[in-house]
Amino acid sequence: MKSKIDLQRQNTNNPLYVGWIGRDNLGDEALMEAFCELFPSMKPFPNTSTFLTRIALLAGKLGWKQLKPAFQNRHIKSVLHRFPQSDVFLGGGTLIGSKQCLPLLQQSIKEKRNVYTFGCGVMDMQFWAGHNDYPVDPAEYLQKWKDVLQKCRNVSVRGFQSQRLLQSLGISCEVTGDPAIHFACKDNVALPKKKILGINWGFAHKILWGNDEMTVGQVLRDAVNRLISQGWDIKVFSIFIKDTTYCRDWIDSLDQPAHAELCVEYKNPRRFIKLVQQCDVFVGMKLHATILAFIAQVPSIMLEYRPKCADFMETMGALSRNIRCDRLDSTDLIALIEQTFSNQEIIRKEQKEVSNHYANISLKYFKRIQAEMGYDCLI
């Protein structure tokens, strides 16, 4: 007996999803799961692990500059050859501008495949230049991306900042929100109102505003020590396996560690949402920890470690609760937490409204793309 998908599909070529998965990182897994739910026939690229993960491992061992273009291109062609007719979806995070994705999309377009982006972030090259062997001439590098994006079938991005970056290159795109907004809670959420603060902090390879995540941890510790003395309890959330040791050590360094609990979730966005809804306020550094708290209707404060964080908060109308990590001050943070707690019901409603607004936008966008690709409506 054929499945529902087999019966309804007109296009027999499964689309390919390009993004990061399989690294015990909840943000990556949430994006992939959102794609799979929006497009039930979506496959990771290629099959069991993503192309980006494979290329990243090669780059990590050899150094990106030592990875010869001929070998890189041969690997790309061999992978694409396994899916000769498939369209390509670029999703899964801040990938527009990444050096890993560019050769893949160039080859896909050369093979006359349809290429789409959905809710991608755009790398701010003014931030990334000088970090991690990224090009020293952002304008020249982005020109290569411009050539690719002009040939994409459709380009949609995470937020207004990403849109402005592409518009500066002359690329037309639409804002559909981050794909993880797909998990937005539609019903009202009852917050505990017990002065429970959620915290997310972690490792960033020193690629952040201020270049030092440990300083961010120290400022957070100072603030949390004072909040605990004022009656707050703390839940510390690790969403990436490499962050867990840092979070555990950070809890141990508190004046009263018994008032802090470690919560770990690498795989399941809905499970994280249930955990974070035990909090009255959430303060997060990692983008998708804060996105998932935001769409769970927990009043959220973003610690902007990279520009992508402000991209999300501006788009959601919450830039007043976005703090760059190099401007973080414990006294100011405490004041913002207390203000957010005092106005939590108003903020909760605002977050619910804007989250569901973008969830509907992304759903309509995806239905339109499915119809264009020759699929009956599966969602």
Image (cartoon, rainbow, N blue to C red):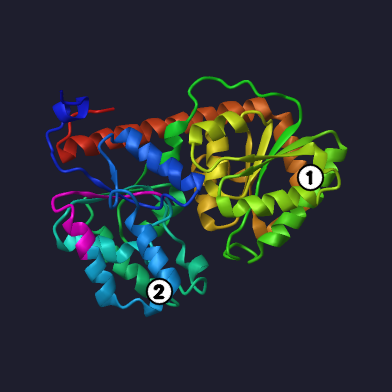
Question: Disc 2 designates what residue?
Answer: 64
Q: In which image quadrant can residue 33 be found?
A: top left
Name the residue at 31% across, 32% down.
Answer: 364
What segment carries the magenta color? 77-92
Q: Position of residue 326 (x, y in %)?
A: 67, 61
Please tell me which residue lies in front, 234 or 348.
234
- What residue type is disc 1 on? Val
Q: Classify 126 as above or below 108.
A: below
On residue 224, which mark appears?
Answer: 1
Q: Classify 64 as above or below 320.
A: below
* Residue 373 falls left or right of residue 173: left
- What residue type is disc 2 on? Trp
Q: In which image quadrant can residue 232 be found?
A: top right
Q: Quadrant of the C terminus?
A: top left
Q: Quadrant of the N terminus?
A: top left
On residue 125, which mark appears?
Answer: none
* Residue 263 falls left or right of residue 224: left
Is residue 102 part of the magenta span, yes or no? no
Q: Between label 1 and label 2, give the one nearer the viewer.
A: 2
Q: Position of residue 96 (x, y in %)?
A: 37, 58
